[in-house]
Image (tube, rainbow, N blue to C red):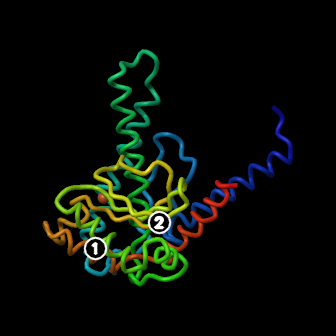
């Protein structure tokens, strides 16, 4: 099929739009998670902040988390996608189901980790439209914060995530609990992501998960949460026509 100049311009515009979204997807001016990555070609996105400057979360912990846990996820997702590329109609069902199960887990782990690191590096002081929206949705910002903290701390000693989501199905903000990478609400945009796997805090806090949750809140980059909220709000309006 012949490619016209109009087609070429459309492709260029779509690519530029994708890059523009990607630039803000992982911590504002920070290196962005690329979009449209071919299977098996994911690359780790660098930390979008100075690892030495977090409050109450050590450089050793955050760089280990990034390199070993997030880095392992990127590596394993690539391996699973490479394996799936060689699977076909003659592949035993238990092999396909195992690979597809791992594909979903590693994909969600990659997404959640990139959002988690992307919403760190700030001063923890809530601000902007998202602070107001949270207050409106939860009966006041302090009430939301009380339950966000309680949800995170309830995962202490186990594993999982606590996520403030923009639920596209209802158009509301909600805080969700997840015991693993695959318990995610089906149709939502993560605004604030808290990693509650033990690897996120054990090195600094041992079993004292609650102290880590408090430290996390002191490092939230609310500018990034506001950017995510603005994009989710626009997407929600577009989805509702
Ligand atoms: Fe993690």
Q: Position of residue 220 (x, y in %)?
A: 39, 76
Along the viewing direction, whichever of 192 and 66 lies nearer the viewer = 192
Spatial CA span between label 1 and label 2:
24 Å
Earlier residue among tags 1 and 2:
1
Furthest residue toward front:
139
**SS for callout 1:** helix
Q: Is residue 75 rendered to the left or right of residue 190? A: left
Q: Position of residue 79 (x, y in %)?
A: 38, 38
Q: Position of residue 32 (x, y in %)?
A: 52, 62
Q: Quadrant of residue 113?
A: bottom left
Q: Locate the C terminus by quadrant.
A: bottom right
Q: Residue at x 50, y 51 (%)?
A: 187
Q: Is mark 2 within 8 Å of ligand 1?
A: no
Q: Locate the N terminus by quadrant.
A: top right
Residue indicated by mark 2:
191
- Mark 2 surroundings: few (<14), some (14-19) or many (≥20) residues within 10 A: many
Q: Is residue 143 rendered to the left or right of residue 210? A: right
- Mark 1 surroundings: few (<14), some (14-19) or many (≥20) residues within 10 A: some
Along the viewing direction, whichever of 136 and 154 lies nearer the viewer = 136
Residue 59 is marked as: 1
Q: Is mark 1 within 8 Å of ligand 1?
A: no
**SS for callout 2:** strand
Q: Quadrant of residue 112?
A: bottom left
Q: Residue at x 50, y 77 (%)?
A: 223
């Amino acid at each position: 099929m012949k490619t016209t100049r109009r087609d070429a311009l459309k492709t260029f515009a779509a690519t530029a739009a994708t890059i523009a979204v990607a630039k803000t997807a992982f911590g504002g001016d920070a290196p962005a998670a690329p979009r449209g990555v071919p299977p098996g070609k994911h690359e780790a996105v660098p930390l979008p902040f100075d690892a030495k400057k977090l409050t109450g979360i050590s450089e050793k912990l955050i760089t280990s988390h990034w390199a070993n846990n997030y880095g392992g996820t990127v590596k394993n997702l690539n391996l699973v996608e490479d394996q799936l590329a060689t699977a076909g109609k003659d592949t035993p069902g238990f092999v396909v189901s195992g690979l597809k199960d791992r594909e979903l887990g590693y994909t969600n782990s990659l997404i959640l980790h990139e959002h988690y690191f992307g919403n760190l590096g700030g001063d923890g002081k809530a601000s902007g439209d998202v602070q107001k929206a949270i207050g409106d949705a939860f009966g006041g910002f302090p009430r939301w914060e009380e339950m966000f903290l309680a949800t995170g701390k309830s995962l202490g000693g186990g594993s999982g995530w606590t996520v403030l989501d923009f639920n596209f199905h209802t158009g509301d903000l909600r805080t969700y609990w997840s015991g693993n990478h695959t318990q995610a609400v089906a149709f939502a945009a993560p605004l604030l992501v808290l990693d509650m796997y033990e690897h996120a805090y054990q090195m600094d806090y041992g079993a004292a998960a609650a102290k880590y949750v408090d430290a996390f809140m002191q490092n939230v980059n609310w500018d990034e949460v506001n950017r995510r909220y603005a994009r989710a709000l626009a997407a929600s309006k577009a989805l509702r026509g």
